[in-house]
Amino acid sequence: MPDRDFHETPSRGEEPGTGRGTERSAELEREREGERRRRRAQFLRDLAEARELRDRVQPRRAKTARLRHAMRMRTFRW
């Protein structure tokens, strides 16, 4: 059975978590997070634009939805 502490063993005499691999992985994680936020922001902008377009094309349905939302908010208890 292999030793179970192999994850804690430093490689090449370094302390765990101080190597360049850790810095690079943290940098990649920040880049991925930034890219995810940019994609999400773009998606939300597109979604808002689509909703505005739908409201302009179907004003009666938009008015009904607004009234329904207002009623829901009035009956909601904080």
Image (cartoon, helix red, strand yellow):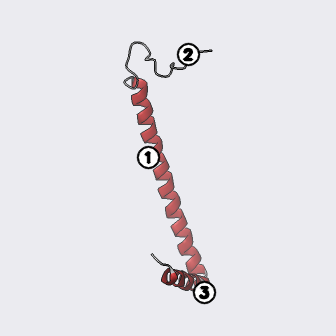
Q: Which mark is residue 34?
A: 1
Residue 27, picture quadrant: top left
Quote the CA–CA distance across marks 3 and 1.
39 Å
Q: Secondary structure at mark 1?
A: helix
Q: Earlier in the sequence, mark 1 or mark 2?
A: 2
Residue 61, picture quadrant: bottom right
Quadrant, the C terminus: bottom left
Q: Earlier in the sequence, mark 3 or mark 2?
A: 2
Residue at image location 50% in from the left, 19% down from the top: 5
Q: Is label 1 in contact with label 2 (beta carbons under 8 Å)?
A: no
Quote the CA–CA distance across marks 1 and 2.
38 Å
Q: Secondary structure at mark 2?
A: loop
Residue 30, picture quadrant: top left
Quadrant, the N terminus: top right
Q: Secondary structure at mark 3?
A: helix
Task: Decide which of 5, 68 is in the foreground and name it.
Answer: 5
Amino acid at pointer 3: Arg
Q: Is label 3 in contact with label 1 (beta carbons under 8 Å)?
A: no
Amino acid at pointer 1: Gly
- Residue indicated by mark 2: 3
User: Badge 3 local density, few (<14 within 10 Å), some, or many (20+)?
Assistant: few
- Residue indicated by mark 3: 60
Vertical arrangement, residue 34 with respect to residue 43, above or below: above
29 vs 3, left or right, is: left
Q: Position of residue 48 (x, y in %)?
A: 51, 68
Q: Earlier in the sequence, mark 3 or mark 1?
A: 1
The number of numbered badges drawn on the structure is 3
65 vs 26, left or right, is: right
Amino acid at pointer 2: Asp
Q: Which mark is residue 4?
A: none
